[in-house]
Every structure is written in C-alpha cells, then in structure tokens.
Amino acid sequence: MSEKATLASLVGLLATVGACSLVNAPDDVLPPGSGGSGASSTGGTATTGGNGGSGGMPECTTDPDCANADTDPCTIHICGPNNTCVLDSTTDPNDDDACTTDSCDPVTAQPVHEDIPPMDDNDACTIDYCDPAVGPRNELLAPIWEEDFSTNDFGWTLEGPWEIGPAIKGGTPVTSPFEKIGDPELDHSAGDDNGVAGVVIGGYTDPTAAIPMQYLTSPEFDATIPAQLQNGRLYLRFWRWLVADYEPFMRHTVEVWDGSAWQVVFSLPNGPVIADSDWKRMVYDITPYANANMRLRFGHAVLQAGVYPDAGSWTIDDVAVGFAKVELDDMNLCTDTVCDPVTGMVTHEPVVDIDDMDPCTFDTACDPARGVNHYDRLRKVVHDFSSAGSETGFTGQWQRGPAMMGVGDPPDDNTDSGDNAILGVNIGGAYNVNTSTAFTYSVNLAVLSTADGTVNLTWQRWLNAGPSGETPHRVELWRGGTLLTTLFSNGGLATMDNKWVEMATDLTPFLTTNPQFFQLRYSYQVTTSAATPRGGWNIDDVVVTTSACLP
C-alpha cells in the first residue's frame, strides 16, 4: 500500500470514530470525560474530558465571589462544594401582615407589600376591613383596640384587689342570695390562655370594712372616628361575670376618659343583687367620648360593712373598642340585637332562650340589667356559725363564738364538726335587764321558689328566758324584705331548755314562682328591769333542704 493510501485510510478511520460515542474498555486507564469542552474553566482538561460542567456557575473560594452569580437581585448565592456558586435562598419579603401580598422587586431587590382591599360581603350591617392577624373580615364591630388579658403586656394599672391572671372558680359558701355562684372557672376567650381581669380572682370581697373606689385602668389608645365613618358609632364591648351587692353596700362602675374627664357609662343599679351565672356580653355606645387619648376603667368599692361575704365582684374578659355602622345595643340584656343585611335596619328582639333545659337549675325571669341567670337548685344550706358569713350585723348583746357554760347556756355546740361555735346573746352570761330595746339578728337563708320543690327549715335552739311578758323572744320569717310570719314566740311561762332542741318549719307554703330571698330574724327584748337575768338565745345549725336535685 502506498504512503498516500495509508494516510487516506487513517483519515477515514478517524472520521468514523469521531461519529461514534467513546466507550472505554474495562482495562482503560483513563475514563472518558462526561461533559465540558476539554481544557476549559468548567470542563476539566483537554486530555481527559474533565469531570463535567456545573451548568455555567462560576468558580469561587468565598461567598462574596458569588455576588453576581446571576442577574436576579432577589436571589442569594453562596460558595458551595467543588468551589462553585450555588443558590442559597431568595429575599424574604414577608411582613407578617395578612392584609398585604408580598413580593421582591427584581430591579431593586427590595420587598414590595401591596394592600389587600377589604372584601365586600354585601351586608349593610357590617364593616368590611382587614385584620393584619387574620386577613379580610366583615363584622358588626370593627375593633381598633382589643384586650383578652392573656398577659398584661398592654400595661393596665391595677389598684387594691384588682388582678390579671388565670380564671379560678370561686366556690360560694351558700350563705347569701348568690347561692353557688362564684367567679368563673374558665375565661371567655376562644384560646387556651384562660386569662381574665378581676377583683380577687377566685375569691371574695372583704365584708368587714369599707373600701374606697379602686380601679382597673387601661393605657391610652387612639379612638378618633376616621373620616370614612363620620356617620358611624364608637362602641365599648366586653364580657362580664359580675357577682355583686348593690348600693349602699357596694359600687361597681364602667367609665371612659373623654379627653378631659371620666364619664360613667355603667353603674350597678340599686337592688337586688347581681349574680351572673355565665358570661354576659356588655355593649355601650361611647361615640360622644371619642378622642385620641381614650382610656377605660372598671371600678369597685365597698361602701360600708355588712356586704354579703361571698360577693366575688368583677370578672372581665375580651374588652374591645371599635366602630360600627349601625346601633349595636339598646342597653337591655333581655333583647338580642338583629340587623337586616339588606336594609341595615336594626331591631331588638326579646330573648327567648330563658329555659336552659336543665332540671337542676332554676331560670330567673329576665331583668334588663341582669339578664337571665341559671342557678343551681339549692341542695343544702347549713349555718353552723363556725365562721363569719351569715350575719347582717350584730345589735345588743348578740355574739357569734364558742359555746360557754353559764347562766343556763350550753357547754358545747350542736354541730358534730367540733368547731364549738354558736350564735347567742352574751354567750356564757346573762342578757342585760337594764334596757327595753328589742335587739335582732338576721340569718340569711337562700333564694327560693316553687321550682325548688319541698323546702324544709330546721334549726337548733338552747333557750333560757323569762315569760314573754318580761322578755319576749321571737323568730320571724322574712321574704324579699317583707315579714311573712312569726315562726316562734316564747310563752307566758319561762323557757328553761337544758339540751339542744330542734325547731322545724315547712317553707313550701311560702314559696312563689318568682325566686325570692328568704331570711330568719331572731330577736329578744327585756320589757322590765324587774326581769330575772337569764342566758337567753343559743342557736346553732340553721339548715335548709330542698327536694329538687338532691344528691
């Protein structure tokens, strides 16, 4: 073969090989290159074909080398393995505001936040707005300031017995009209913080002394009405659980700051007591007081001694101030506010769910200031006089204390508990015969009605007294502040008990369909200084039982 022919054959062979994929035999020393273009910055050497390209990313030794890895300023690259730039993240434009859409400007790399417009629900009663926490909302009341008392981060000022903390159930010692109504076990909020504000959370007001007005006061907040709502109204809304005596014993108020003075929007009306059995929504129109330095405060005072000892006072939750297009409330807890979504007209419909369908509660008639309450039926009330609670005030020589033998008085009380406490006149001694005044002592029983079924009263006496002509001793039954009947009067001869004697009365004939407060009044009087000094009244274990829902 000529040299020229041999060269031509070699060229043809190379052309054939160039058209095929290179596949090395297993015993080849060097593997084929899997990418790249030979001796380039990204593909390896011309000899081996390299380890393959990295898709065009530049080489690097530190993160700053990757500052211009691509043309998008919203991306961030770092120097990764094999000394090549890799995508680490993109600029985060999120502002944690549910009322904006968030993006990154590809030119400036700055976050962009575009407002989400309110979603019109075509309801003439609602305000359409956006809440940064949850997004668009449509509500009767658009809050501008809210408090759920999960903490005191807002900085409320607390005076005297006011507290902010977890709700604690207050058990009532059933010695007053509040029966088993105490502070709530749970807050009103939907979350699990269980936070409330209250007067002695889970406890009771000190009934022994007057306490001046003391307040729970909010910080300042802007409550000016925006221009687009010049025809709207500003409302205060909160939820209360209030157990309180009335004036002249206690005072409870809700007040707002109008920019120059405090204005009272709620004051507890005169009797009877308020004893909420559940959370009640309170709404007050405070439009006349709108200003840029609004504050709220809740007041509590004990005006004089003699307050019912189990008055838990205020418990408050979910306070809000906000705007509305329509009238939200008529200041009547016996109506529900209803707004027509087409016309925006408001009506106040009577409350219809008075019966809670629980056979072990009685349901009160609705009172505009107190609403409807559902109280436990009275199972048993016992006054053993071991602690203060049942008295409404001592006069004369009435006392509560340990039994003490003397002048016919008993050496021990009647109660099995060992407290040895009784109610009596000059315990261990004789009544004073140098006075002609009648002295009384009232023992509070309970709120009772025909719904309680058969109701029985028993009490224990140890009485040593002269004839009624010299020292009349009486027991009277009162209902709703009115004398019903005299249950006991000593006779024309001296009474000389030498043991505890049980006295019993069926109260059922005195019950009415309307629940009313019952009370016993014990009295004694010395009508002549010639009377013989004797031990007088000794009383223990005043008990009321009912047939309804007995354990």
Image (cartoon, rainbow, N blue to C red):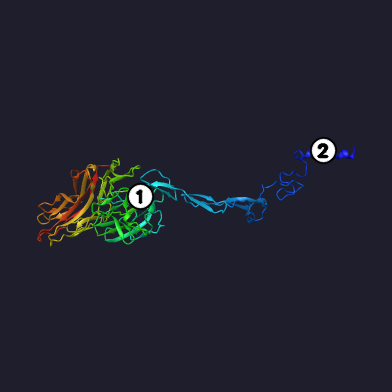
Residue 433: x percent and y percent? 13, 61
**Considering depth in this image, is 218 or 241 the residue closer to the camera?**
218
**Considering depth in this image, is 34 or 342 the residue closer to the camera?**
342
Q: Give the distance between the C-alpha atoms of the residues marked 1 and 2, in whole angstroms.
A: 92 Å
Question: Crowding near pointer 1: few (<14 within 10 Å), some, many (20+)?
Answer: many
Residue that appears at 87% across and 39% down: 6
* Apparent side of residue 306 relative to residue 13 in the rendered image (left or right): left
Vertical relation: 301 (above or below) 332: below
Residue 314: x percent and y percent? 32, 54
Identify which amino acid the numbered label 1 is placed on. Ala
- The kind of secondary structure element at disc 2 is helix
Q: Earlier in the sequence, mark 1 or mark 2?
A: 2
**Considering depth in this image, is 504 or 153 the residue closer to the camera?**
153
Residue marked by disc 1 = 324
Vertical relation: 505 (above or below) 441: above
Residue 515: x percent and y percent? 23, 46
Vertical relation: 142 (above or below) 527: above
Identify which amino acid the numbered label 2 is placed on. Gly
Residue 233: x percent and y percent? 34, 52
* Apparent side of residue 408 relative to residue 235 in the rendered image (left or right): left
**Residue 77: in sight, yes or no?**
yes
Residue marked by disc 2 = 12
In the rendered image, the quadrant that contains the N terminus is: top right
Q: Residue furthest right?
A: 2
Question: Crowding near pointer 2: few (<14 within 10 Å), some, many (20+)?
Answer: few
- The kind of secondary structure element at disc 1 is strand
Residue that appears at 15% across and 53% down: 474
